[in-house]
Image (cartoon, rainbow, N blue to C red):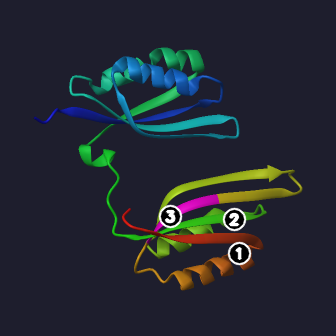
Amino acid sequence: MTINKNHYAIFVLGTDSAGIVANVSKALFELGANINDSSHTIIGNQFAMLLLITTNSNCLLKDVQSAFSGVCKDKRLTIHVHELSEEDINRKAYEPGQLCVIHLYGADKPGIVCQVTSLLAKNKINITDLSTRRFGTEENPIYIMYLEADVPSNVDTKKLGQELKEIATRLNVEIKYELEEVASL
């Protein structure tokens, strides 16, 4: 017997403070929702969270939105709820390839993220995780980037490595990358 369910993406934004994740997850628990996938980060002093949830079919978009009214008021958050289809909840299966992890470290300058991600896009490489941090002083800013990506099996990884080295030289940063075989993505 198939049970009908509704699926939603929830975006949470606001000034960081202790208890946001607890309050959001409590509202979802009280709603009877299941968190399928989630990610959150703090950028500067801003909290950002994305959740993919499933509810029973009686739980409508307006019900999910109203479940957060107290959290929004208490924590001064902006929460947006977006209805999804069944296909939007589960990650697409990709053909077996390689997991690529890229670490970049160096003096901050415009274009770092653009140049690395443009190279990956040109090679039809899907980025699955990306985070960046800026440290140091205004006079001496240091930039760190961490990136994970799915590399299709038809990509020439030697050429990719050479192109990443060219970007590192051009930007005067250090780029390390690792490739790992993946049975199925």
Relative placement, left or right, of 30 versus 72 is left
Rendered residue at 54%/23% (across/down): 22
Instruction: Check disc 2 and report its element: helix, strand or loop.
Output: strand
Q: Which residue is mark 2?
A: 104
Between 52 and 78, the one nearer to me in the picture: 52
- Report, in whole angstroms, how far the alpha carbon at label 1 lies from the one at label 3: 18 Å
Reading the chain from its start, which is encountered first: label 1 or label 3? 3
150 magenta-colored = yes
Q: Quadrant of residue 43?
A: top right
User: Would you place residue 58 above or below residue 151 in this image?
Assistant: above
Q: Are marks 1 and 2 in contact (CB under 8 Å)?
A: yes
- Residue type of the residue flagged with mark 1: Ala
- Residue type of the residue flagged with mark 2: Leu
Relative placement, left or right, of 33 versus 123 is left
Q: Which residue is mark 1?
A: 168
- Residue type of the residue flagged with mark 3: Ala
- Report, in whole angstroms, how far the alpha carbon at label 2 lies from the one at label 3: 14 Å
Give, as a single range, the part of the protein colored magenta: 146-151
User: Would you place residue 111 above or below residue 48 in this image?
Assistant: below
Instruction: Check disc 3 and report its element: helix, strand or loop.
Output: strand
